[in-house]
Image (spheres, grey):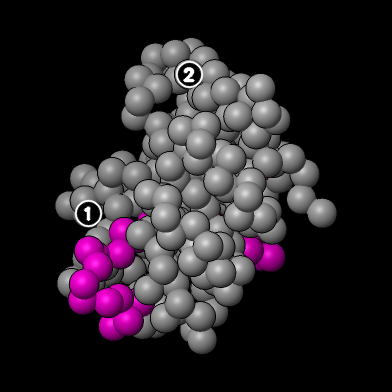
Amino acid sequence: MPKIADNLTQVRRLIQQSASEAGRNPSDITLLAVSKTKPASAIREAFEAGQRDFGENYAQEAAEKIAQLADLDITWHFIGPIQSNKSRMIAENFAWVHTVDRLKIAERLNQQRPEHLPPLQVCIQVNIDGDEAKSGCLPTETAVLGEAIRRLPRLRLRGLMTIPKEGSGAQPFKDLAQLAHALRRDGLPLDTLSMGMSGDLTDAIAAGSTLVRVGTAIFGERT
Ligand SMILES: *Cc1c(COP(=O)(O)O)cnc(C)c1O
């Protein structure tokens, strides 16, 4: 079996196993294949092995690959930091954005989302462990940002996303799940928890992840 197809099979198996250990239905967990820095040919290979959701971090690089792969029915997710001057490219090319962490960016995306496309699906990136080096709004700011996003007609609020400090174990995932639970109780419609990567997807799934973002385990190391 070609390498990428083989890797995908193994990642799917791990998701299934992690879900069943957690008493969860594996079909409630979406696998997002993170293809940043990888060529369009690698994405095509993964698509042929049945993968449909792909994540990219750099707007310019992604726009080029999206154009090259326009013949494929791919759902594209933006998962990188959002610079203001790249927001239009993101609003025009992606179905999902996982990294909205301030109102100004949400408003730009709302304004720039083309009329002929469905609303942009949005997750709020939360800096759940207060890591200085990281983007993401603070847990205490999430409710206000969520309410504001909810009022923007060209965006659809879907959930929360986080990238915990490396090696911090299961706790940040539990904290994000708890935050989502509290916000839902207060009326925010959140059905997505975007958390877990190649190295920690089992912990993330145990805590309630509905979407794991996996790069290295599918496409190999990035150079
Ligand atoms: C690169 C990246 C991933 C994938 O990380 P791997 O460790 O290669 O699985 C997931 N999420 C985000 C936000 C990323 O930037």
- The residue lying toward the viewer, choosing from 213 and 128, is 213
Q: Give the extent of the magenta segment.
A: 109-136
Closer to the observer: label 2 or label 1? 2
Q: Which residue shows up at 66% across the image and 22% down it?
A: 1
Res 60 visible:
yes
Q: Which residue is mark 1?
A: 188
Please report whichever mark, 2 or 1, sits nearer to the chain's N-terminal start. Answer: 2
Q: Which residue is mark 2?
A: 16
Q: Which residue shows up at 42% across the image and 55% down it?
A: 71
Horizontally, is 118 left or right of 101 in the view? left
The residue type indicated by label 2 comes to Gln
Instruction: Say which quarter of the image contains residue 168.
Output: top right
Magenta span main SS: loop
User: Dot 1: what SS?
Assistant: loop
The residue type indicated by label 1 comes to Leu
Mark-to-mark CA distance, 2 and 1: 29 Å
**x and y percentages locating residue 5 in the rendered image:** 60, 29
Q: Any magenta on residue 153?
A: no
Tell me if mark 2 has few (under 14), some (14-19) or many (20+) residues whose alpha carbon lies within 10 angstroms of its own. Answer: some
Cβ at disc 2 under 8 Å from ligand 1 = no
Instruction: Say which quarter of the image contains residue 14.
Output: top right
Q: Which residue shows up at 70% across the image and 30% down it?
A: 3
- The quarter of the image holding the C terminus is bottom right
